[in-house]
Image: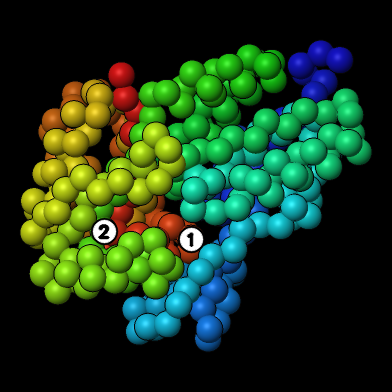
């Protein structure tokens, strides 16, 4: 069967912040944000701003749950070649569920292929990888070629984040409540990155927005960014995202910056005012 006869599909869990992805067959599998009061399903029906506001006034424990194996299988549909990408496996069971779905899917359809990618990241870095897959499909690359292209490309992408609040991360057991409270009280913004292991690594504490944005640009340079594609996802903070875009454009000559809103899952972790920055590196 030639490449032109095969159907290709990209499937991502909702931490990619994408409900639509033009130019390719695409499906999103929803994660869920769970509190003692309510369950939020991260799909097209979710009012993200309302969820963020609810969580701002919620002090109990919160957690997330990943798409089920069945939801992943349903999302694969009838595609001959599937590229499935998940939030980092250190924060969620989404990758394991996608792998189980792949195994069941291939058992039922031995002639098909599924490449499951543990992004070791989330949000905008996942989007960069998805854009590379879409570009490779459009260029007529084979499934095997695309797998190789993606594995190589992922060595040259990264994720930075800046957080105004770490309340949800504390409620979720990801950071110490003392650290989270100190950040909230002192007006400290935390700048960090997704580490090579796929966990959250704190890099800098900055007082005020201006310092935080300057620090992001400095970190982008130190991590090998020299322009290229940069994707900024913000949680109800378009103003800061636009300021960051200006700083990036002033620093890097050949850069293509895109700004968009965080979906539910990334808004849960980034919280109000937070931003996630996906970038290409040398």
* CB-based contact (under 8 Å), mark 1 and mark 2: no
Residue 169 lies, with reference to residue 56, above or below; the image says above
Which residue occupies 29% across, 71% down?
177
> Pointer 2: what residue?
163
* Quadrant of the frame with the N terminus: top right
Q: Is residue 71 left or right of residue 179?
A: right
Q: Is residue 275 left or right of residue 62?
A: left
Give how far across and how far down residue 89 sits, in percent. Answer: 54, 46
State the colouring used for the structure image. Answer: rainbow
- The mark nearer the N terminus, 1 or 2, is 2
Which residue occupies 8% across, 59% down?
207
Disc 1, SS: helix
> Pointer 1: what residue?
265
For label 1, the crowd category at 10 Å Cα-Cα, with few meaning under 14, some 14 to 19 and many 20 or more, is: many
Disc 2, SS: strand
Residue 82 lies, with reference to residue 253, above or below; the image says below
Give how far across and how far down residue 128 sits, in percent. Answer: 45, 34
For label 2, the crowd category at 10 Å Cα-Cα, with few meaning under 14, some 14 to 19 and many 20 or more, is: many
Q: CA distance from mark 1 to mark 2?
A: 15 Å
Give how far across and how far down residue 2 sits, in percent. Answer: 81, 13
Which residue occupies 51% across, 78% down?
35
Q: Is residue 234 left or right of residue 94?
A: left
Question: Nearest the camera: 160 or 205?
Answer: 205
Task: Find residue 31 and report its image quarter.
Answer: bottom right
Q: Is residue 242 visible?
A: no
């Amino acid at each position: 069967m030639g490449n032109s006869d095969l159907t290709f599909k990209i499937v991502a869990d909702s931490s990619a912040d994408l409900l639509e992805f033009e130019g390719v067959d695409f499906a999103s599998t929803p994660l869920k944000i769970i509190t003692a009061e309510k369950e939020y399903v991260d799909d097209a029906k979710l009012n993200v701003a309302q969820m963020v506001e609810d969580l701002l006034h919620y002090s109990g424990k919160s957690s997330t749950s990943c798409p089920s194996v069945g939801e992943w299988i349903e999302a694969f549909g009838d595609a001959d070649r599937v590229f499935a990408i998940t939030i980092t496996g250190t924060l969620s069971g989404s990758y394991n569920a996608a792998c189980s779905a792949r195994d069941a899917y291939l058992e039922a359809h031995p002639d098909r292929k599924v490449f499951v990618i543990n992004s070791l990241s989330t949000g905008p870095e996942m989007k960069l990888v998805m854009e590379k897959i879409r570009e490779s499909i459009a260029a007529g690359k084979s499934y095997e070629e695309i797998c190789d292209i993606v594995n190589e490309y992922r060595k040259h992408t990264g994720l930075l984040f800046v957080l105004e609040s770490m309340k949800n991360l504390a409620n979720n057991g990801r950071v110490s409540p003392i650290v989270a409270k100190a950040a909230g009280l002192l007006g400290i913004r935390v700048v960090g990155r997704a580490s090579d292991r796929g966990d959250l690594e704190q890099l800098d504490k900055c007082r005020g927005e201006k310092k935080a944005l300057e620090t992001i640009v400095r970190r982008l340079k130190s991590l090998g960014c020299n322009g290229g594609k940069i994707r900024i996802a913000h949680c109800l903070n378009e103003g800061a995202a636009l300021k960051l875009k200006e700083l990036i454009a002033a620093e890097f000559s050949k850069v293509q910056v895109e700004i968009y809103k965080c979906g539910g899952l990334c808004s849960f972790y980034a919280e109000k005012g937070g931003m996630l920055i996906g970038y290409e590196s040398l």
